[in-house]
Amino acid sequence: MALFMDGPACTVDDLTAHDSGLLDTALTEGIDVAKKIQLAVEEMTPELQIWLDRRRYYGAPVWQPVLKMQQVVVTPALRRWQQMLALTLFYRDAYFSHLVDRYQAKWQAYAQLTTEARERFVDTGLAIAQLPVPQAGLPVLGSAAGPQPGGTYYASVSWLNIQGLEGQASPAASLTVSDGNVMTVVPGADYPGGNWNVYAGTSLDGMYLQNPEPLGAGDMWSFVPGAVTSGQLLSAGQNSDFVIPLIRTSLRG
């Protein structure tokens, strides 16, 4: 599972799965759906931080380390809350643009679903990773001479912590190479050092783990098309190590 601080836990496609008319409304009213998703993240962050802070006052031994936002793991309940909140913010904006009744009805319906989703999240608790591994940034792709046919190839990388736990894989990068060359992959500028994995393939839905052992600082991976055609797909991130119960707070917004 991804970490909350990796970025939005939902996409525009996730929202359109709930509301098929979303993009038409966005076009008509000039609303940026991605910005509403980001706004939902920003509204949720302070409330999550309150729960982390309150843990120090409600039963947690004083010797336990202070938990940080970087440790929060996205669960299905947290993702659902973010989706419903983003839809609420979207239709609230749409309604106040022209005071259209149908937008108000959707705004109110999604506001109720947001409340229900938040309550469900509170019931399930806050998932925490003891040693969080952030999502990697885009890898740097290049080419080198090699006896391979050319083509367009895709690659992604992920970081590993000292326990070998893997973070969420980076967004995919692509490169078109000419005949007689192979694609090379190295970590991006955000590489923190330590071990890393590389996923690559000839399509976005066919990117498999390429390295049999973790790669380290200074390593470069050369992708040979067809060498790995099955196995582990892109890492979705690490699982939580424990869940903390939540103290209910009032919902803002």
Image: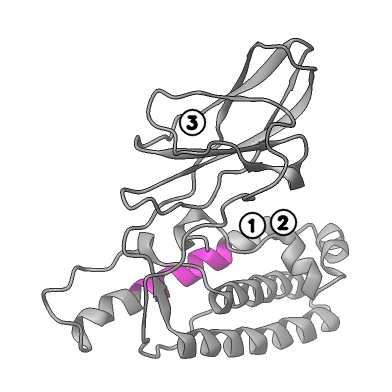
Whether 234 is drawn above or below 249: the answer is: above
Q: Nearer the viewer, residue 26 or 206?
A: 206
Q: Is residue 98 visible?
A: no
Residue at the image position 33 percent from the left and 53 percent from the top: 163
Q: Is residue 43 magenta?
A: yes
The type of residue carrying mark 3 is: Pro
- Looking at the image, is mark 1 or mark 3 nearer the viewer? 3
Q: Position of residue 74 (x, y in %)?
A: 51, 68
Cα distance in 3D space between marks 3 and 2: 31 Å
The region drawn magenta spans: 39-49
Element assignment for label 1: helix
Q: Position of residue 147 (x, y in %)?
A: 72, 12
Tell me the chief SS of the magenta region. Answer: helix
Cα distance in 3D space between marks 2 and 1: 5 Å
Label 3: which residue?
187
Element assignment for label 2: loop
The type of residue carrying mark 2 is: Asp
Q: Nearer the viewer, residue 201 or 123?
A: 201
Q: Nearer the viewer, residue 22 or 161?
A: 161
Label 1: which residue?
35
